Image: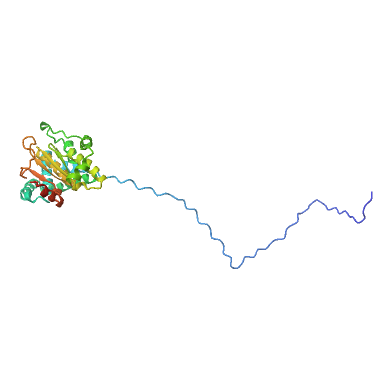
Amino acid sequence: MFWDKKIKWVLKPTINHKPRQEPTKVVTRPKSFTPPSKPEPTKTFTPKSKPAPTTLPNYEKEFLRIFKTLCHRHRSWDIWKDFITMFACSLSNTSDKSHYDEREALYMRTIKKYPKQEQTMFPDLVAYTVMALDRDPEQDFLGKIYMDLNLSNTSRGQFFTPYDVCELIAKVSMGDDVIDIVEKNGYITIHDPCCGSGSTLIAGIQEVKSQLEKVKLNYQNHILVAAQEIDYTTALMCYIQLSLLGVAGYVKIENALTKPISRDDTSENYWFTPMYFFDIWITRRLLKGMSL
């Protein structure tokens, strides 16, 4: 075989062979170099817990609590009658000056039955009644408590109609001509000759109110309530609630069968709501020639 003399074979031993080492690189840190700061630990997000829902006060429960405290020394019926009497006198004397002296004297005779410590409890009963009707005007607050306390006079047929039933009666009896009557006369009259604590009237007021609001009319300027009741205490319960609802009207305490409401009546047995004395209703009475 022919061999090129210029080719030289160099055989390198493979035993104890060391790999070639790369030259070490020297990294020079620049003078302006700032080492990176350590990363801050990751914060875990914890959502804030929602505040617990606010529990609305139970005005009926608080009313009964105070009322039963007064019952330690007095009969429950006497306390109820005195409370309703004083409450009604206080409302009447804000506007009805023709009965002021008589009803102020009645108030003072009633409150003097109780020591000072107990006298301070009656304003609390008033406050809970006002707040209850302010929160929910579509109810017979006093009538419900009256029945819960078993104060009704069954011998005289006192069985108050549940408010749900009164709502149904109002929707059926009012009809769709409320707006037409108001546009014609300026107001609509709601009459109940056996009003009790006013449950049926309250439901009727709310039904008329809902219809008037559709045409943006203020119900206080366009509803007149005429009520009558033979029982003194329940009649004043109705009067109180009508007054707190801000409607114009009156309650006559008399037998509707023997002495119904008449244009010839004097105001002796009448209790007029404060709204009845507002200018708009005074003007209407003058124009209509109303005696009351």
Query: Where residue 1 sits in the image (x, y, percent)?
Result: 94, 48
Query: Where residue 141 sits in the image (x, y, percent)?
Result: 19, 41
The colour scheme applied to this rendered structure is: rainbow
Q: Is residue 122 left or right of residue 50?
A: left
| Residue at the far right in the pictured view | 1
Q: Is residue 280 above or below residue 160?
A: below
Q: Nearer the viewer, residue 129 or 177?
A: 177
Q: Nearer the viewer, residue 211 or 134?
A: 211
Q: Is residue 174 above or below residue 221?
A: above
Is residue 63 visible in this depiction of the protein? yes
The residue positioned 17% from the left and 36% from the top of the image is 147
Query: Where residue 192 sits in the image (x, y, percent)?
Result: 14, 38
| Residue at the far front in the pictured view | 184
Tally of numbered tags: 0
Query: Where residue 176 sits in the image (x, y, percent)?
Result: 23, 39
Q: Nearer the viewer, residue 209 or 179?
A: 179
Is residue 75 visible in this depiction of the protein? no
Q: Quadrant of residue 84?
A: top left
Q: Nearer the viewer, residue 70 or 99?
A: 99
Q: Quadrant of residue 162?
A: top left
